[in-house]
Image (cartoon, coloured by chain):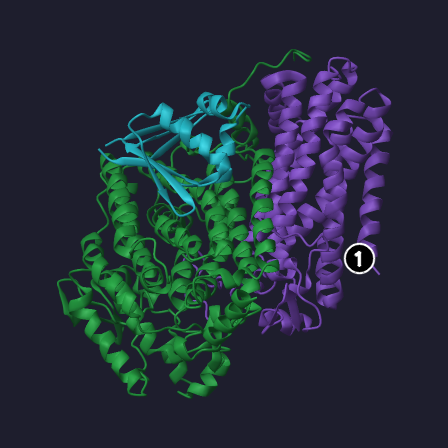
Chain colours: A purple, B cyan, C green
Amino acid sequence: MQIDVQTVSIEQKNKAFSHLIKRFGDKKIPSRYQEASYDLQAVENLHYRPTWAPEQELYDPNLSKIRMNDWYDLKDPRQFYYSTYTLNRAKQQETMESNFKTVETLGLIEGMPDPVLAIVQDVLIPLRHVNYAANLNNTLVCGYGYGTVFTQPCVYHAMDNLGIAQYLSRLGLMIGDVEALEAAKQDWMDSDAWQPLRRSLEDLLCVRDPVEVFIKQNFVLDGLLYPLVFQRIVDQNLVEQGGSGISILTQFMTNWYLESVRWMDSVVKTMAAESAENKAVLEEWIDTAANHFTSVLLPVAGLAVAGNAADDLVSDVHDELMKRAKKAGLFK
Amino acid sequence: MSKVFIILQANEETRSIVDAIEQDNPDAEVVHEPAMVKVQAEGHLVVRRETIEEEIGREFDMQELNINLITLSGNVDEDEDALTLTWNS
Amino acid sequence: MDIKKTPKKLNVKEKYRLMTRDLAWEPSYRDEKEIYPYVDYEGIKVHDWSKWEDPFRLTMDAYWKYQAEKERKYYAIIDAHAQNNGHLNVTDARYLTAIKLFLQGISPGEYSAHRGFARVGREFAGVGPQVACQMQSIDEIRHAQTQVHAMSNYNKFYNGFKDFATQRDRIWYTSVPRSFFDDAMSAGPFEFLIAIGFSFEYVLTNLLFVPFMSGAAYNGDMATCTFGFSAQSDEARHMTLGLECIKFMLEQDPDNIPIVQKWIDKWFWRGCRLLTLVAAMMDYMLPKRVMSWREAWNIYGVENGNALFRDLARYGIRPPMHWDDVEKSIDHTSHQIMLGLYQWKFGTAFHSWTPTDSDIEWLKEKYPTTFEKYYLPRWEYAIAQKEAGGEYNNFGLPKLCQTCQLPCLFTEPDDPTQLAHRETEYEGEKYHFCSDGCQHVFEQEPEKYIQAWLPMPALMQAPLKGDLAAWMEWVSLEPTAAGEYANSEDKANFEKWRKQVSTD
């Protein structure tokens, strides 16, 4: 191959790094995503076993019940590496910054009906603690999962969850100052509506299979929670009741969820297609967790809508999740 | 006394920051090396937002320092108005 | 609750507390020990996690904003570097050896740090250190990736870059940094933080990044200089984290002091041994030098290190145990390492060379008490062999130190004419060390270090059984990537291309 810079022609020696040619051939120049992701994790001749768990390897695919012949099959369809990830989020945060300003300058919160603000206080603000658990869970997957294409997006996802918790905190400060955060935390710790979810998250924080944590947190819980709270309660119910300003301030969460779904579904699909054993494990995890989290989210939905309407909402999002699972090749 | 220091990339943006640091720390010594500039002082060095803002003629967020910071030495205390480096000995 | 009241203006510290600290809660359905199973076993006592000081209070929105700005700058420069044949701007192709070594040895370390910080970012039982460590984890993958991207363009034109992934796991000298990071990752969360966050980041990375990257700029390599400085701007946060973490441990309980001291002793030594490779990079591999390893050590090691340990003295922490041995070695190690690399150059995926006349003048000036006396004669011998048409190679396999994995090529601290060699017998096996420092580290935890994967014995065992050609294939080492610089394809190509550019 020849390249010409002015009159200088220099012959390239190598098209790409060898490990990328081995994976993708040498027809195309590898993308920066490929360079930044494939085979970055050490695989052999690891020097010492972990002192915290000598039965494990330093990078150990056997920490999970899920087996992959090649963990690098679990590619992130968004092709996020640090740079693309950060540039994307920087853009989104700029939008959010101007959204916060707009809501502030137009005094949208002050003009909002009390019932809307009460729902924000009762349902949205306590979620910052859910995001904190999700942050820890994704950090665990990044730390102990196998293969960079699988583990790398998890640290981004962990930081995103922290970012969302911080946006929710700002929203809380806007509607009711520090007291709003205090009241939400009290609810999280004591109110009946939140206890089943808090208990479930404490249980999930004790799970050490990185893929199980990934599936239950990201695919199942978020797959129920975001459609329920942000797509339905905020973007439909609150908007109808005069709370459009809130929807502007949760725009990041809505878009982020839609973006994450592509990644989740692709990972689940690839794992399920790998083997009948994987499929069975995933079905067991997803089925149990989906039923469990649906029941856990019912009292939360009940804080926003009354009686049967809450039942309808959660069964709606449960169906939606199971549809995604089917599309990914499960339960067939 | 031990020396604290801050090292910034040498570019247009940091010229004024370095000028501001010099104003606030008359005893500080400025050392230019390839692609970087080091400001050091005995025991204590302060970088003040207001002085930087006067130098650059716009608002400055202390966290903007991150973009061009190469390294520092000393115990760090940062708030919205200043970054302080100190050694306790 | 008082809805719709005007929020009071919060200062940065209070705001940050609400945005991070306040997110956590005390679990009541499960025991903390189930959630954080590894936080106790090293013996570090923590009574109050909330006493952790957050050094830089970056919320995620600010993090995204400022990091994106750095990324935009960085990729603009390396794109321009690729488009304009920036590789031809380096002083000469000898310089490439330094960045080959960087890609094979240091970038994988950045990756290990990324994974290690994710682990401790999960294992610590306090939200303050969790978030700080997570932020470092995401920064570290940035560093690994920007380095691979910067080197990708060099890989298109030169040997020695393309097989870094295989060589990271298999070639002999990369097991020096690999064993260092594996050692830290296989330790508990607190030791990991002392190892990487404190000893490596705080005490030693300045030596790696600051003078070396300034050197890259001086040698016309804007791509490397840019990733170096861009990474270093994150390091400033990491170093501060390292310092805060050590103060936190020391302030929590007096029982922590001896444990922390033991780790400082170990990791300072481990780090200094690792940095001997950087010493050779600085003194020999930069065709134009900014400062010698000795000068860099005086500024970033001695001056800065002393300031730090004077500061920590109030907790009862003393300077690291083998500090004096390191100090005595500074005028020697770069020469010893470079002579070693030169004599084993048939087995390295980078080139080495004998110093030129002007190099020799510079080395004499910078190392007035050691270079001419101890090392110049050996270089002259190598030069004479070369001039007589021979080659200065040592096909004998070096004996590797069981701890640091460098060949046992260092001398006694007080006698530069005497090779240092230590042995320890453990469970009927003999283990070899390059120094008292490495032997000491081994003896604290023999059950760990006997597990070390030693590349040289591996070469002698099945399936390679000492077959050098088979070994080269196994480590993906092509003959064109190894050996003497003067005869290399890299040199010939670089000079040819450079001539084309300058005559046009």
User: Is residue A191 placed above or below C497 in the rendered structure?
Assistant: above
A285 vs C55, left or right, is: right
- Judging from the image, what secondary structure is the residue with disc 1 in? loop
Residue A300 pos. (x, y %): 73, 31
Question: Can residue C24 be seen by looking at this rendering?
Answer: yes
Residue in the foreground of this view, choosing between C124 and B42:
B42
C489 vs C435, left or right, is: right
For image coordinates 84% across by 35% down, the residue present is A313
Please, which residue is most extreme toward the front here? Answer: C503
Amino acid carrying label 1: it is Ala
Instruction: Give the quarter of the image for residue A183.
Output: top right
Q: Residues within 10 Å of mark 1 (few under 14, many from 20)?
A: many
Residue A23 pos. (x, y %): 65, 71
A246 vs B23, left or right, is: right
Instruction: Give the quarter of the image for residue A252.
Output: top right
Quadrant that contains the N terminus of chain A: bottom right
Question: Can residue A59 be seen by looking at this rendering?
Answer: no
Q: Chain of mark 1?
A: A
Residue in the foreground of this view, choosing between A100 and C197:
A100
Residue A239 pos. (x, y %): 83, 25
Which residue has dot 1 on it?
A: A328
For image coordinates 27% across by 36% down, the residue present is B3
Quadrant that contains the C terminus of chain A: bottom right
Please, which residue is most extreme toward the left here? Answer: C414
Residue in the foreground of this view, choosing between B69 and A133:
B69
Counting labels gives 1
Residue C102 pos. (x, y %): 44, 62
Residue in the foreground of this view, choosing between A12 and A21:
A12
User: Is residue C462 placed above or below C160 in the rendered structure?
Assistant: below
User: Is residue A224 placed above or below A25 in the rendered structure?
Assistant: above
